[in-house]
Amino acid sequence: YYSEQYMENFSKMTNWIVDNKDGLGIQYVVHTGDIVDEFNEEYQFINASDQLKKFEDANLPYGVLGGNHDVGHGNAVYDLYQKYFGAWRYENNPWYGESYKDNRGHYDLITVGGIDFIMIYMGWGIGDEEIQWMNDVLAQYPERKAILNFHEYLLASGGLGEEPQRIHDEVVAKNENVCMVLSGHYHNAKTTVDTFVNEDGTQRKVYNLLFDYQGL
């Protein structure tokens, strides 16, 4: 909605982040999708691109993924998303790790407070191939704390839908370096905590955060 008709909101948000970057120690920004409202309206991508460029100008690493509104809902049309937010835009940054299908998915490598993180993103329409890619990447970086970013994961009720449940079972549960899952899609905010038992008998907590205020 911000990219469609409420650009002043988008601008206030990006300006606030840049203005407070040093004072609050903001070192990374996550966008969990629905960058635009209509996937086939190029002006909305231009609006969003101009706003997110502020992070680039401020040397502030950030990651994006395609939500259902960005890619034609069930049709997964990534054309305009990849024109404005494809791998070409990010691949020369030192923190950008690797692209999956021209930034349909990707991962970033960052270090904050002495902790090495891997930020994994996967856009709308997650199946066997996407799950395999995420598991392969996580296996490459077992020493890094992993934060997974999706458009849809946590329901507003705190539960999981069919596709997110599969991600939970086949990715989150199986990789001991996963510590957090971030998502949007549902207009609400919610936090839940899952507890897993690691192979050595220790427990691991994974924090799931839903954050999508645009409908409020």
Image (tube, grey):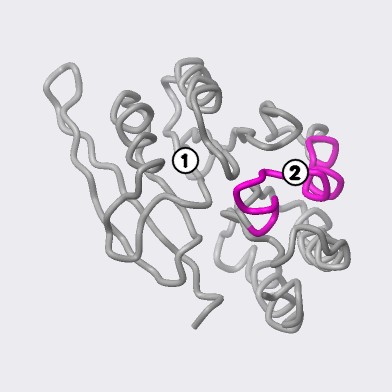
Image coordinates for residue 167, horizontal then vertical, percent: 39, 35
* Total numbered labels: 2
Magenta-span inclusion, residue 77: yes
Tag 1–tag 2 contact (CB < 8 Å):
no
Q: Quadrant of residue 199?
A: top left
Q: Main secondary structure of the magenta part?
A: helix
Residue designated by label 2: 78
Q: Quadrant of residue 99?
A: top right
| Disc with the residue nearer the chain's start (1 vs 2) | 2
Image coordinates for residue 105, horizontal then vertical, percent: 63, 35
Q: Quadrant of residue 157?
A: bottom left
Tell me which segment is drawn in magenta: 69-89
| Secondary structure at numbered mark 2 | loop
Q: Nearer the viewer, residue 156 or 118?
A: 156
Magenta-span inclusion, residue 13: no
Left or right of residue 60: residue 113: left
**Is residue 29 shown to the viewer in this render?**
no
Q: Nearer the viewer, residue 135 or 11?
A: 135
Image coordinates for residue 100, horizontal then vertical, percent: 67, 28
Q: CA distance from mark 1 to mark 2?
A: 20 Å
**Is residue 146 shown to the viewer in this render?**
yes
The residue sitting at 46% across, 21% down in the picture is 135
Residue designated by label 1: 148
